[in-house]
Amino acid sequence: MKTNFLLTSLVIVLFSLTANSQITKGNWMVGGDGSYSSFRSRKVDGSGKFSPFSIRVNPNIGYFFKDKMAVGVSLEMGFGERDFHVLMSPFFRYYFLKQDKIINIFSSINAGYGKRFNYSFNDNYNLSKFGIKTGSVIFLNENIGLEIFADYSLNYYQYANILGRTGYVDYIKIGVGFQIHLENNR
């Protein structure tokens, strides 16, 4: 009972503290994230097996075109047991709480295109992706945010070396990110 009270009090205090984070119109964010993912389901026509897990690194850059709303691009690089992929993804991100909060909640959508290479079967694939990400960011100061998130993506594969063979894999990812918010001093 005492633990629940302390935890609830801590959450209320953290969400009520303020900082002047730079999620306002005209500012930039530069950073990235890393994630671990595993299969939720898969459907692949034909040959090779997909890696049952993947480690991803995603550097990004974004611009706040309106308060709490950013657009940008991310470069996703994924490394698995049997494969590697690289993908370019434009994104849209929205922050739900006011910009003066130390902890904020965000959500983003992205879509992208790239290539996947399978080491075991010497195959490569065209890759299209649609993803949804949500999480929270803790602003360590007005410019630096630490993110914890969950991400769902649906990846559609088209085999580059054999016509007509396709497949899809959907992933659920858990990750952490780091963003530097740059103030536009005009």
Image (tube, rainbow, N blue to C red):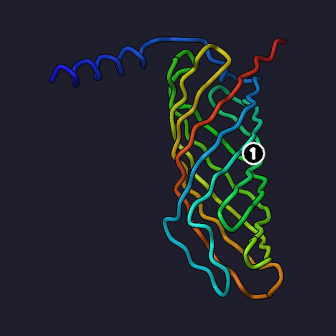
In the rendering, at what x and y percent does residue 8 appear?
28, 22
Viewport quadrant of the C terminus: top right
Above or below 140: residue 96:
below
Task: Report the quarter where the N terminus lies.
Answer: top left
Q: Secondary structure at mark 1?
A: strand
Q: Residue at x 34, y 17 (%)?
A: 10
Point out residue 39 in the picture as x, y percentages from the top left corner.
Answer: 52, 65
The image shows residue 106, relative to residue 20, as above or below, that is below
Looking at the picture, tell me which residue is in the foreground, 87 or 184: 87
Residue drawn at (77%, 73%) of the image: 125
* Amino acid, disc 1: Ser
Where residue 52 sits in the image (x, y, percent)? 56, 66
Number of dots carrying numbers = 1
- Residue 60 point in image, percent of width and height: 75, 39
Up the image or down, 132 lies above or below 42; here it is: above
The residue beneath circle 1 is: 74
Above or below 58: residue 66 = above
Q: Residue at x 49, y 65 (%)?
A: 40
Q: Quadrant of residue 161?
A: bottom right
